[in-house]
Image: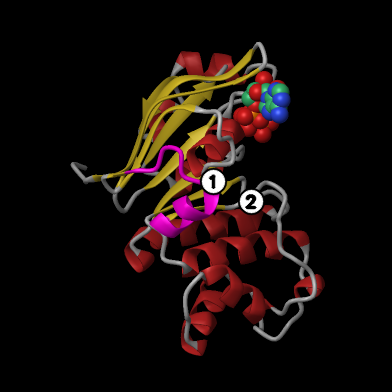
Amino acid sequence: KGERPVLVVEGLSVAYGRITALAEVDLVVPERTVMGLIGPNGAGKSTFTDAVTGFIPGATGSVTLDGRKLDGLPVHRRAAAGLRRTFQQDRVPPGLTVAGFLRFSAHRRVSAAELEEMADFLNLGTLERHVSELDVGSRRLLEVAGALLSRPKVIILDEPAAGLAHAESMELAERLTEVPGRFGTSVLLIEHDLEMVRRACAEVVVLDFGQVIAAGPPATTLARPEVARAYLGDE
Ligand code: ATP
C-alpha cells in the first residue's frame, strides 16, 4: 500500500552450533499494518522474534526501527525504542491484579480510563481480578494488552491464540485488525492458525528452514505450491 517501513530486518542470521536456524532473512513491516509470519514447526519463527527483540545477542544482520539501528542493544533498550513482543508461554507474574500488571507492563503512566478501555478492547474482564484467576488464554491476551499500552511502534505476537477457543481466536483476529488504527502500532503476528492469519493480516511472510520462501497477500501466498509443500507433514 506504499506505507512507510517501520521495522526493517536485513540479513538476519542465527546459528545454534552447527544448526542454522535463520539464514539471511530480510523482512520489512510497513507502518500501520498487520503482517503474518508463518511456517511449519522449526521454521525459525521464534528464533526470528528472539533475534529481532534482542533475546539472542549472537545474531548477525541488522534491525532498524523507525530509522534507528537497534543492533547490539539489549532487550529493554529495544522495548523502550518501541519494539515489544509477547511469548508463546505467558510470563505474567502471579500475585498482581489485571490493573497492576497492565500498569507494570505499560512502562509509562496510564490513566484508569486507558486501562478500562484496553480491558474492554481485549475482553479482560474487571481490572481488580487477580492474574491467578485468569485462564491461560486470558493471560496471553493480558500480555498483549500490557505491551500495547506502551504504545510500541511494532509488536511481535508469538502465537497469541494458543490457549484460546476458536471463536476467541477469530475475535482476536478482528481486534488485531483494529490495532494499527487505534494505537498506531504495526503487528507482526506469528500464528499456526491460518484462518486467523487470513482474517487478521494484510500480508504474510512464510519461513521454512530459516529462510523466507514466499511473501504477499494471504489469499495468493497461502495458495502457492511451495507453501503447501512446506506445511506437508506438519501438525
Ligand atoms: P515452532 O512453530 O515449533 O515454535 P519455530 O518456527 O518458532 O517453531 P524455532 O523455534 O525458531 O522455530 O526453531 C528453529 C530451528 O532452530 C529448529 O531447527 C530448532 O530445532 C532450532 N533451535 C531452536 N532453539 C534452539 C536452541 N536453543 N538450541 C539449538 N537449536 C535450537
Which residue was labeled with disc 1?
A: 196
Please report whichever mark, 2 or 1, sits nearer to the chain's N-terminal start. 2
Which residue was labeled with disc 2?
A: 161
Quadrant of the rendered structure where residue 49 is?
A: top right
Q: Residue at x 55, y 29 (%)?
A: 58
Q: Residue at x 41, y 22 (%)?
A: 214
Q: Position of residue 206 (x, y in %)?
A: 48, 26
Q: CA distance from mark 2 to mark 1?
A: 9 Å
Where's ligand 1: which quadrant? top right
Amino acid type, residue under disc 1 in the picture: Met
Q: Nearer the viewer, residue 97 or 226?
A: 97
Q: Nearer the viewer, residue 32 or 66?
A: 66
- Establish if 14 lies above or below 95: above
Q: Position of residue 1 (x, y in %)?
A: 21, 42
Secondary element at image label 1: helix
Quarter of the figure that contains the C terminus = top right
Label 1 CB sits under 8 Å from any ligand 1 atom: no
* Disc 2 crowd, CA 10 A, few/some/many (<14, 14-19, 20+): many
Amino acid type, residue under disc 2 in the picture: Ala
* Disc 1 crowd, CA 10 A, few/some/many (<14, 14-19, 20+): many
